[in-house]
Amino acid sequence: MNGEIAAGGGGAAASHHVPAPSSGGLPPGGLPLLQPAAAVAQSNLPPHSSDPDEESRRVLMALDAVFAGHTSQPGTDRGGKDDGGGAAVGGSRDAADRYLTSFQRHTVSWVVCDRLLAADAATGNGHGPLSRSNPAQQQQARFFAAQTLHAKCRCDASQLPAESLPSLRDSLTNHFTGYAAALSQGPSGGSSRALVTRLAMALSALSVQMSWLTVIPDVSHNILNPRPELAPAVLELFKLLPEECGSDRLILEDERRRRDFGFRLRDEGGSILDFLVQMAQSEGDADVTKKEALLQTFHSWIRYVPLPPQLLQSTPLIDWTFAVLDRPHDGDNAELFEVAVDVVVEVLRMYPSDRPVNEGLVMRMIPLAMNLGRKGATAVAAGAAVPAAPTADDGPFRCALHEKDEDLLRGYCRIFTEMGESYISLIVSHEEMNQERLVDLVLDCAEIPDKEIANITLHFWYKFVSWLESLEPLEYRYHMIDHYTPQLLRLLSTCTLLLRYPVDIDSLPDDRVDDVQRDRYYVSDVIEDCCRLLGGHVVLRNVGDRLKEECQRVSTLVPPERRGAEWHGIESCLYAIRSVARYIADEEQDVLPFVMGLIPQLPPDVRQLRCTASTLIGKYALWLDSHTVHLEPLMPYLAQGLSTPQCTSAAAVAIKELCEGCNKQMCMGDPVLQLYDGISAAQQEAHRQHAHPVLELRDELEVLEGACKAVSRQLMEEMSSGRRTPEELGAATTAYVNRIVQPIGQRLAAEAADGAVGHPRAAIAEVERLTVVIRYLDVPHSASRTADDAAAAAGVAKLGSKASFIMDLMSESWALLDAVSQKYPRDIHLAEKLCRLHKHVMRGVGPGAFQPMLEPLRVQLVRNFSQSHLSPYLYAASVCIAEFGSDPAMVPLLVGMLTDLSAAVFGMLRTRDDFTSHPDVVEEFFFLAGRAMTHCPEQVVISPLLNSLLQCAAVGMELDHRDANSGTLNFIEGTVSYGLRLQRVGGGGAAVEAHQACREALEKAVVAEGQPLVTNLASAILGDLPLYRLDNSRGSVAGVLFSLNELCPVLLMQWLTPALMQAPPTAKDLFLQSLQDRAPRDEFDTSLRQFAKVCERNRKLRGNSPASSV
């Protein structure tokens, strides 16, 4: 055996001896922590053995169970005496898989895997662990061993002493060369390409771990030169070296090793390219696999190594790669085509034209790449984009277009698009280089019938427009826009083609339909980009002409039945016109009249066409407001859309947008309200019949919102115009309000009635309808003075019309809303909607108007939360504090509410399991407490509540829940920040004495409860607790530590230093020094990020070590 790794107490030493890891094996009964402790305890897996022979036997049994099922009794065909552990390992596939996963993290796996790969296993001679296995089992075991060593070289190199890494390297090299030699002899050699590749990956990862900077010359001198038949394996190794160096899965103790190794790879770039050229010249007619490997290696070095552009400029490999692309049908080129495309695309991407150092390489790439899309003399003379049949002078891209070869077209499209993006600085350059030819090539790609290929170009157009828009001076920008106007107009025509739905859209699966919609969205962005360059009127005219042409074409189809099926072109034009709505003036008279007249004539049963047309109507609401003659026929069209499956949302939103935009020449209030009355009646009839609703609630609410806005505008305009007397206006207002609100109140009363059989969904619907009315119905001052009287009694100024209306409405519905909340006390969706309603009421009327209702709301929130423990009530309470916390008169009431809610929260969160089971409560509770510390902190600080809040926050920080973690940190940072504000208070008097009392109370609470908080913060940095908010603006680890360091630096260092005992010493010292130096916040955040990054890397390294696996 040439390369066995010896472990303490097990196995004979080999010629390349690697000392055993200092931890040896696990103590009896130990298991690696691959899963939570409880899960491990229930896994019934045997402990790993520190004896490599015994562990090898168990691993082989587990592999048998995983790959072939357990077919023999433990120990009968593997040799050795079963100690009871074998049965557990090989008894089931699941147990075997878990055992193997655990084994891969254990230190003994170094030795076992080395033995499984040893030379006697490859030959089948001797008494190795695989000597009794059949060939299939041997292959499985070897690949598992190589895979395990690769993973360990990536992540677990720290398990081995540094002085043992050279011996590990030699052992891996022996395995690599041995199996590579066996592979060169054919399948009967006991090897495989996958095995050799995995060993090369392990050796590459180890090279970076141990800073084997001379790996390339060493391999060339010691392996390649004496054994040239191993060139394919060496090529694979050279391909993988830069990939492993750049992998984020490679965990290094010192990231400088990666940087230094990368620099060395860059220095070796010339020798690697020479080696590749030599191989390319010597292979000649070698099999395509070797040529493909050569190109893959070239691609890897371009992608991962910053090779000097001069090297690529001078290498013959560029010419060879383009030769494959220029003659894709010759010899093996068809199989090499895709990887050749990858190489060229990577060169273009990594060496853009806007870097002067790349100029020589760019000038070399341009003619080679452009030659792929060359036109023959016949085509140029005729002015045709693509000749009817390709000639000998045409480039391969033209031939692929003619042959409709999708694989070739995809490759050429990638090249031309990447070239356009990478060389965009040349495209917009003042230097004449026939740049428009490249833009035309990208346009040719965009016109490829396969939309998946054509859409590759979309990002180029975004970049192209962005660069044109940024050109300076302004005169030059306009000059370049004019220069490329023909291409932009051609692009518009192409976009209408790309917007077309597939003919089989109705039969496509949902995920494919989502892809189509996403691509259409991106294409519409391109059309908008063209508007910014050409002007909306130019784009609209261009698309409008295409729409007219398409309508003319469809109208001539025979038989007439075909016309209903040929809707795709019309729909794509309408979609494009919809996309440019915000760039079109209200005075437009050339295209939009034709479009609006066309819509009612469209086939009514094509849902895609109806959806697009409905959306277009809504987008042009302002135009229609100035052209009401076109609006009247469109309203019935939208109303019909409400009853068309899958078109209701588009129609409902369009109606809402018309109500928002139209009211100058045509009052929308009455017709839309009449439409809503019909919808409401139909909805209630469906409810009584227990049938499916006519409209989804969200669509009904869109129409209701539109009706409210239209009625509001109509009433306000009548009031401002003086067309009605105050009495007439009051009567009209009352009629409209009753028409909208009374049905909601009646249905809500029916739901709230005792003994009524209902469902929370019905109550939720009424609450949502009421919320829409409160948000969007704005009326002149009504005759009712209920709210004004209540405000006057409370000493509040007279209310505005909207506030008066809302408060009247809430006064009348308060008892019903309260009854509904009691009828369905544990329905979280109803609670969310009720609290959302109260939020909009508070913000809609303002704190002054809402003040009389604050006490009843406080009582309701405390009672409902105490009964249900639903988090929305805590959110509503936090809104109350945000709205009223600045009013000293309201602070006692708010703090009392916080105290009552805190008692309920503390009563339900008694154990850590309670916290884990209710993360939403933890989140909202601490956001509530945080708002209290922001808006009314004094009363909270001097109350007995603060200590309990801090104790609860210490537990909440441990939750593995992003929002709960955010809430706790937000509260803690707010508390400490308030302490800093208190420190800055100066002067004298009663106010200062009050601040001093607050300061003493807060500092006392921080001293009493601060250590657990800081310990948790340290644990989060070390990775032992969740770290969701490291340095965010509102509530973060950085914010709390920075504020504590300002408030009590000595205490913080006393708490933090022992909590960071396990942190990497150097990084810890730098971080603590930044605290001691009182670095500014931005510098402190940077220091903490760097420290956390080092801790994360250290955790990944140590997380697989025996110290943390026992």
Image (cartoon, rainbow, N blue to C red):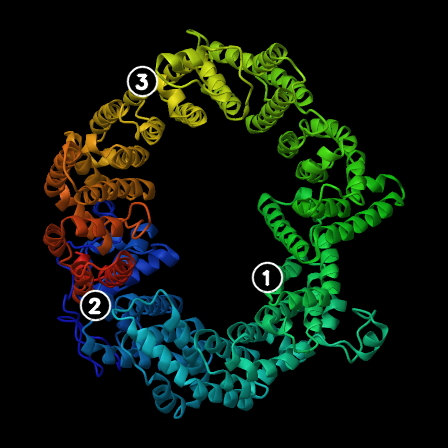
Query: Quarter of the image holding residue 534?
Result: bottom right
Q: The residue under label 2 is which amino acid type? A: Gln
Q: Residue at x 26, y 57 (%)?
A: 74
Q: Position of residue 779 (x, y in %)?
A: 56, 20
Q: Which residue is mark 3?
A: 855
Of circles 2 and 1, the one toward us is 1
Q: Based on the displayed image, in which of its 4 quarters is residue 796 positioned?
A: top left
Residue situated in front as seen by the camera: 573 or 340: 573
The secondary structure type at the circle numbered 2 is helix
Which three-letter amino acid code belongs to the residue tagged 1? Ser
Instruction: Give the structural element (helix, strand or loop) at label 3.
Output: helix
Q: Residue at x 32, y 81 (%)?
A: 173
Work out whether residue 1034 or residue 535 is closer to the camera in this orientation and state it.
Answer: 535
What is the CA distance from the residue labelled 1 to the residue labelled 3?
56 Å
For residue 159, the mark is 2
Note whether residue 324 is visible: yes
Placement of the N terminus among the 4 image quadrants:
bottom left
Q: Nearer the viewer, residue 336 or 373?
A: 373
**Label 1: few (<14), some (14–19) or many (≥20) C-alpha neighbours in 10 Å:** some
Q: Which mark is residue 466?
A: 1
Residue 797 vertical placement versus 2 (above, below): above
